[in-house]
Amino acid sequence: MVDKLYFNQPILPVNPSPKKQQPDPRGRAEAQSFQNILQQQVTKEPVKFSQHALQRLSTRNIQLSPADMQKLNDAVQRAAQKGARDSLVLMNNMAFIVSVTNRTVITAVDDASMKENVFTNIDSAVIV
């Protein structure tokens, strides 16, 4: 046999009194410091090339000098500072689609292949 329980008052959840927590200025400074250190480390990392991009560089006979690589790294860094995720980088009659979050060149296009081309799935463009 099942007994039924009856309550005269509704059952309400227990709400502990909210405690006022003072912000820890030391913790906030450490977080900002960590963010700055992380940003510096990310910017030191050079741009990588995907396998597809390496194939495109080879088949289209695109050669990048150390100065070109520096320009590409700087362009990706500027895009990252603006919050870009996937960017088109136009440089010296070449185009690069770059995943800014991964710092990886997805594909490379030379001047001849750029004509009549449509670039999709990008959220920014950097012209160097």
Image (cartoon, grey):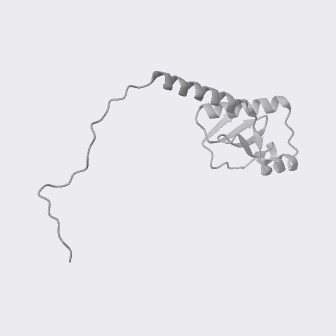
Where residue 67 sits, quadrant-wise, is top right
Q: Is residue 19 shown left or right of residue 53?
A: left
Residue 2: image location, x then y, percent? 21, 74
Using the rendered image of the protein, determine whether residue 127 is visible from the camera's viewpoint.
Answer: no
Pick the residue in front: 95 or 2.
Answer: 2
Q: Tell me the quadrant of the picture where the C terminus can be found.
A: top right
Residue 113: image location, x then y, percent? 79, 48
Q: Hey, which residue is sitting farthest bottom in the picture? A: 1
Q: What residue lies at 87% left-to-right and 47% top-to-bottom? A: 58
Pick the residue in front: 79 or 19.
Answer: 19
Q: Hey, which residue is sitting farthest left in the picture? A: 8
Pick the residue in front: 37 or 44.
Answer: 37
Vertical comparison of 10 with 78: above or below = below
Q: Tell me the quadrant of the picture where the N terminus can be found.
A: bottom left
Residue 105: image location, x then y, percent? 74, 43
Q: Is residue 6 shown left or right of residue 77?
A: left
Q: Is residue 104 shown left or right of residue 68?
A: left
Pick the residue in front: 5 or 115.
Answer: 5
Q: Hey, which residue is sitting farthest front in the picture? A: 1
